[in-house]
Image (cartoon, rainbow, N blue to C red):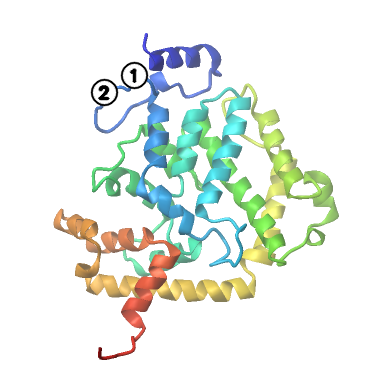
Amino acid sequence: MNIREEMEQREMELLSPYAARSRDSRGRDRYEEECDIRTVYQRDRDRILHCKSFRRLKDKTQVFLAPQGDHYRNRLTHTLEVSQTARTIAKALRLNDDLVEAIALGHDLGHTPFGHAGERALDRVCPLGFAHYRQSIRVVERLEKNGAGLNLTWEVRDGILNHRTSGSPHTLEGQIVRLCDKISYIHHDMDDAQRAGVITEDDIPITLRLLLGENTKERLNTFIHDIVDNSRGKDAISMSPEIEEGLRDLRNIMFQNVYLNPIAKEEEEKAENLVEALYGYYSTRPDKMSEEYKRLLEDGEEMNRVVCDYISGMTDQYSMEKFRDIFVPKGWSVY
């Protein structure tokens, strides 16, 4: 047996009966020779890690737009935190942590500049609609590698598509990522909000702190242990009703104090206006897009979708540079 086959055999012997085993994957849309070292999910993880869309996440907003400080989260650090939390849970439950890691690293590849503000803007102005989880699938199936896509396994794509709250992943590994995405953003957004002085621990009711923990670190520990305790030996990933309700209460506090904060919403409105303006411009001037997106048009792709592809792929800074180039007059001088 080669190294990959040895790892696949260990999976058969050591993983839970409910785990997604690499050997049993539904496979890829396009046939490929197997690697002699890595399993299929390890190859998917590496493809995502090395793709351009993954690198661009470092300059995309998580919750605070253009924060002045080195320690605020961005879309990349969010992705890494989801991955680590999900892998911890997967290992404890003897599930396939390579599959979990691949799903987690790819789940936000389709996110827009300025986070959900940019997503709302594109969904509003594009006749075809826009959702980042669907765009993440389009990134890995169509946009990466000059239109060839990453040719990921079915299980990874299923987990990426279904990571949203209303999603229904077919694997337990996908269910872990779906839950860890919510836990992670609530956890680190509250940490960032406290750092920014928008919220304090005193804004959290004492009953909730007694249930979940006195600080963000303790609460994350509570969520992880609760998922493990309530999912061991079961064919579904879940939290206890009490802790799940506590998570919902914490999320409501974040909406009241942070996500719907008037100051934050005012800046988000500016971001949405910027994205809408870019969409309007490129919809009428598709020839101004990058060459790779013009090739999509030449291949017969729908123009509105390609414009969304182009804009959603931009980082915060790049979208602002494009806006200035297009809409802000430049001084005229003679040399």
Front disc: 1 or 2: 1
* Type of amino acid at the residue the image marks with label 2: Glu
Residue at the spot 22% in from the left edge and 68% down from the top edge = 286
Pointer 2: what residue? 33
Tell which of 152 and 50 is nearer to you: 50
Kindly tell me whether residue 262 is visible in this rendering: yes
Left-right relation of 25 to 176: left
Q: Is residue 168 visible?
A: no
Left or right of 56? Residue 333 is: left
Q: Residue 264 location in percent, x, y?
A: 60, 71
Residue lying at 68% horizontally and 51% vertically, measured from the top left:
248
Farthest front residue in view? 335
- Pinpoint residue 302: horizontal percent, then vertical percent: 22, 59
Image spot of residue 174 (x, y percent):
50, 35
Q: Quadrant of the C terminus?
A: bottom left
Tell me the residue that label 1 is attached to: 36
Counting labels gives 2
Q: Nearer the viewer, residue 263 or 245?
A: 263
The quadrant in which residue 37 appears is top left
Label 2 element class: loop
